[in-house]
Image (cartoon, grey):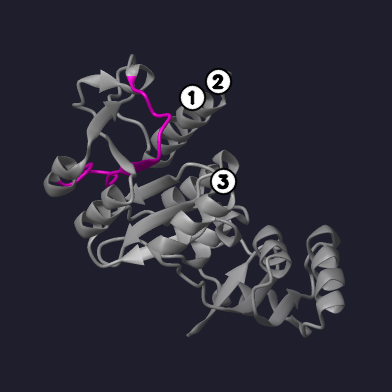
Amino acid sequence: MEDEYIGGKHPILEAMRAGRTINKIWIADNAQKHYSLPIIAEAKALGILVQTADRRKIDQMVEGVQTQGVAAQVAAYDYVEVDDILQRAREKEQEPFILILDEIEDPHNLGSILRSADCTGVHGVIIPKRRSVGLTATVAKTSAGAIEYVPVAKVTNIAQTIDLLKEKGVWIAGADGDAKQNVYQADLNMPLAIVIGNEGNGIGRLIKEKCDFLVKLPMAGQINSLNASVAASVLMYEVVRQRNIKK
């Protein structure tokens, strides 16, 4: 398993608190104390080596991320199996609540989706191995630490995975702008996986045909689409709302 680098106070603190293997932490000489001191204290308690380094070197370790002058070398993120996600639901004595991301390519979208997934109690997220962003440093930063708590499964074939979930009693709902019913008319209070499509093209045709039903978000404005992570968040919270209605 290859090592990778993460930057920023929150991603590093959450990685430590979640028990990730951290080999070393670097802190810039000019890093602000409110970024560096909590990390130094936590690292000391865990016996993790902390070194000072030039700010430019730290920024180069984690390119494209606001490091706040702190970076860490960590073991790569572990992906889980789909069965692990279902097991997590069983352990919590809840009906499965899963997200399937069909070729999400923007790491900021994936990070935001993981953040909302953590907030809404999603048991796990499924992504394809090809044509999809994985768990990168930018995803970690955007997720504000949620990447440590939401299991992610990387699968070779989304269509086969949907068939597997159906065999386990999970219903598949696809988010699609051309759906006949909007999300507020749909019954989502069931063992459920929601499919969110690619930022530009939506859900692929084969995957759409595999869905048990499709839902759309009502649109009133001039721009007839929502960012993928915003749409995913609205759908997740509608599931939460329906599951929390007093019986």
* Residue 170 shows in the view: yes
Q: Nearer the viewer, residue 229 or 100?
A: 100
Tell which circle, 1 or 3, labels the residue nearer the N-terminal end: 3
- Per the rendered image, the range of residues in magenta is 186-204
Q: Tell me which corner region of the image, top left, top right, bottom left or bottom right, holds residue 228.
A: top left
What residue do we see at 36% from left, 65% from top? 154
Q: Secondary structure at mark 2?
A: loop
Tell me if residue 232 comes above or below residue 13 in the rendering: above
Instruction: Identify the amino acid type marked 1.
Output: Gln
Q: How many numbered marks does the figure carry?
A: 3
161 relative to 66 in the view: left or right: left
Q: Tell me which corner region of the image, top left, top right, bottom left or bottom right, holds residue 183.
A: top left
Q: Label 2, label 3: how many angstroms apart (C-alpha)? A: 18 Å
The answer to whether mark 1 and mark 3 are in CB contact below 8 A is no
66 in magenta = no
Tell me if residue 92 comes above or below residue 153 in the rendering: above
**Is the C terminus in the top left, top right, bottom left or bottom right quadrant?**
top right
Task: Residue 245: give its label.
Answer: 2
Q: Label 2, label 1: how many angstroms apart (C-alpha)? A: 5 Å
Q: Which is the main secondary structure of the residues drawn in magenta?
A: loop
Instruction: Identify the amino acid type marked 2.
Output: Ile
Place of residue 90 in the rendered image (x, y in percent of width and height, measured from the top left):
52, 52
Tell me if residue 222 comes above or below residue 144 in the rendering: above
Residue with the mark numbered 1:
242
Place of residue 88 in the rendered image (x, y in percent of width and height, measured from the top left):
53, 56
The answer to whether mark 2 and mark 1 are in CB contact below 8 A is yes
Place of residue 41 in the rendered image (x, y in percent of width and height, measured from the top left):
87, 70
